[in-house]
Image: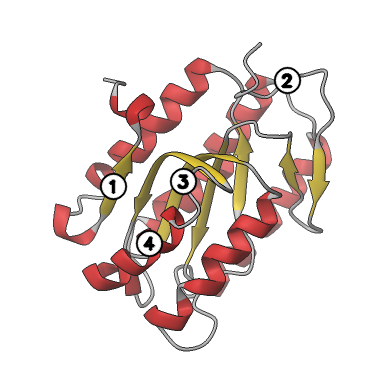
Amino acid sequence: MSPDFLHPDRDIRKHGDSLPHWQQGEALQFVTFRLADALPASRIRQWKRQRYNWLQTYPKPWDAATEGEYHRKFSMMLESWLDEGCGSCLLNNLESRKILADSLMRFQDERVIHEAWVIMPNHVHLLFKPLVPLEKLIQAWKAYSPLHIGKGPIWQRNYRDTLIRDQDHFVSVVRYIRNNPVKARLPDNQISLWLGDRAARIS
């Protein structure tokens, strides 16, 4: 099995509290993080309550079918809300997106190998191979950009991450990243999309 993908027999490093994050060496990760005001508090409470109840019945680790059910019920719910464009949408601004893009690519091939990412008006999707602890990467990206984009804590404290299982999963995530602006009906001047060589070859 390729070291790029989740291996069922290798140890998984877990960190975080209420929403544990999983990292398995340099296996590929799909990560989403958002601006702090991108979702109304009432919706977040609703989502957390429904998710908590579901996890009591289906605790991790999951098989592919259960993971798919989780994403249909909870990830897609969040994505549809994010695509509504709530909040300040600081990343609508081209200069703000350039600052974030520079931050993302700052350590390319040193601390991270990016495969694909898209910067939406109020959130970001990334597909990458982490070469250092995942939380250190996210922290560095989030710490750099507010110095130049906006005052105060502009980012949500947490983030969502998914280990990539196999090549089919990789292809599915690349297509999702590429199509997210289309699904949200956003013009090209409101988003920034980057595809590495491997992702660019996917039709």
Residue in the image at 21% along x and 61% along y:
190
N-term-proximal mark, 3 vs 4: 4
User: Residue 200's x, y, as percent?
Assistant: 29, 28
Q: Amino acid at mark 4?
A: Asp
Q: Which mark is residue 102?
A: 4
- Residue 126: image tag: 3
Could you tell me the amino acid type at mark 2? His
Asked where in the image residue 116 lies, by quadrant, the reply is top left
Q: Residue at x 42, y 22 (%)?
A: 171
Left or right: residue 192 versus residue 139 is: left
Identity, as a three-letter code, of the amino acid under mark 3: Leu
Q: CA distance from mark 3 to mark 1?
A: 10 Å
* Pair 4/2: label in front: 4
Q: Earlier along the polypeptide chain: callout 1 or callout 4?
A: 4
For marks 2 and 1, the one nearer the N-term is 2
Q: What scheme was used to colour the molecule?
A: secondary structure
Of the image marks 4 and 2, the number of the one nearer the N terminus: 2
- Mark 1 crowd level (few <14, some 14–19, many ≥20, 10 Å Cα): some
Residue 159 versus residue 43 in the image, above or below = above
Q: Secondary structure at mark 4?
A: helix
CA separation in Å, label 3 and label 4: 14 Å
Q: For the residues marked 1 and 4, what is the alpha-carbon distance in whole angstroms? A: 13 Å
Task: Determine which of the numbered discs, if any, sits on residue 7 in the image.
Answer: 2
